[in-house]
Image (tube, grey):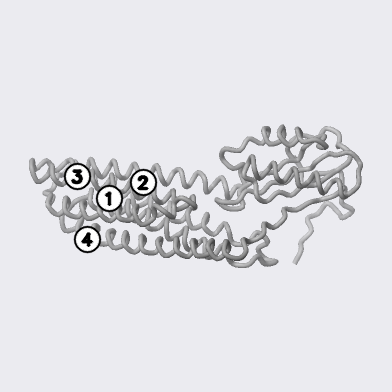
Amino acid sequence: MHQHDALPHPEPAGLRGNHHHHAEDLAGRHLIIVMVLNLAIVVVQAIGGIMAASVALISDAVHNLSDVSSLLIAYVADRIGRREICAANTFGYKRAEILAAVINVTLLLIISAFIVYKGYERLLHPQPVEGMIVAGLALVGFAANAGSVLILRHDAKDNLNIKGALYHLATDALTSLGVLVAGLVIVLSGWYPIDSLISFVIALLIIKSCWDIMKEAVNILMNGTPYGLDVHKIKEELEGIEGVEDIHHVHVWNVSSRSIAFACHVIVDDQMLSQVDKLAQRVREKLFCDFGIDHPTLQFETRKYEDVGIYCQGIFCSDMSCPLPSKAVSHK
């Protein structure tokens, strides 16, 4: 039995390395600028929404806040995730962003529920809304989001998280246009219910976004199979590699939102260790190039156990027996 762990990927050297780190630092600075800009808009719109008695404008502020908090979480979690791996955390701190995302989503869902409640209350008991304030601050929000998109557009080419943030900022810009229209309708016609209706639409957008994030976060925390990966397809592809007889006891999970781990047992003919090393390299290349798996652990065996399936059903993924008593053993 021979076990191969994931090989570390070498860091870029020389000018390429300097360029890589410079790009990361520049993207980080751009993120900070966008966060500060949008946080200022959140404060202004929240105060303006209270002054104008507009639930829609407050909803737009919360929608912007959701993006600010998401960007902040991604930035802080990325910094935490760079901390060195230690004996107490052998996978590092990469899941810090997942825990933070769950907390953030929970708070946003509570706020969204309150917005829906206030909007419904306003429908039952309409109140005058200052349409000019609503339209003016919505226009400011649109300009801020459009400016944020321009600031981050180049960074999004090489960073999936920033690309996602860019999409949300563009959505925010469209939401602000909706609030702007609501403000103009109030100014021109005095039809106040449109304020509540727009707040419902914005709340639903926030809830949908939160639901998608929460679903992905729970899947990661539960070590579920990453979305988009087919375990049976992976098994089929690996078994198509020359020298691999069978793949079983497969585990695949997210270490973080950007890293996928994989473990399995590989049945091969009895052969020299050097030949197994070559085969392991081909398997790792297949996993990374075809499935984006960057942290594989492969356990090579020369015989197949009876009645073994693709998944590991017990604590031990082999026929090993423990000589210790069946009582739980505590390690301190």
Identify the residue position indicated by label 3 in the image: 195
- Name the residue rendered at 57%, 38% in the picture: 228
Callout 3 secondary element: helix
What amino acid type is highlighted by mark number 4? Ile
Q: Nearer the viewer, residue 329 or 40?
A: 40
Q: Nearer the viewer, residue 196 or 154?
A: 154
Residue 206's label in the rendered image is 2
Give the Cα distance between marks 2 and 4: 20 Å
Question: Residue 267, located in which quarter of the rendered image?
Answer: top right
Dot 2 and dot 1 residues touching (CB under 8 Å): yes
Identify the residue position indicated by label 1 in the image: 59
Give the Cα distance between marks 3 and 2: 17 Å
What amino acid type is highlighted by mark number 3? Asp
Residue 47's label in the rendered image is 4
Task: Answer few, some or many: residues within 10 Å of disc 2's Cα (few below 14, many 20 plus, some between 14 and 19).
Answer: many
Give the Cα distance between marks 2 and 1: 9 Å
Query: In the rendered view, does 309 fall on the left or right side of 232?
Result: right
What amino acid type is highlighted by mark number 1? Ser
* Sequence-first disc among 4 and 1: 4
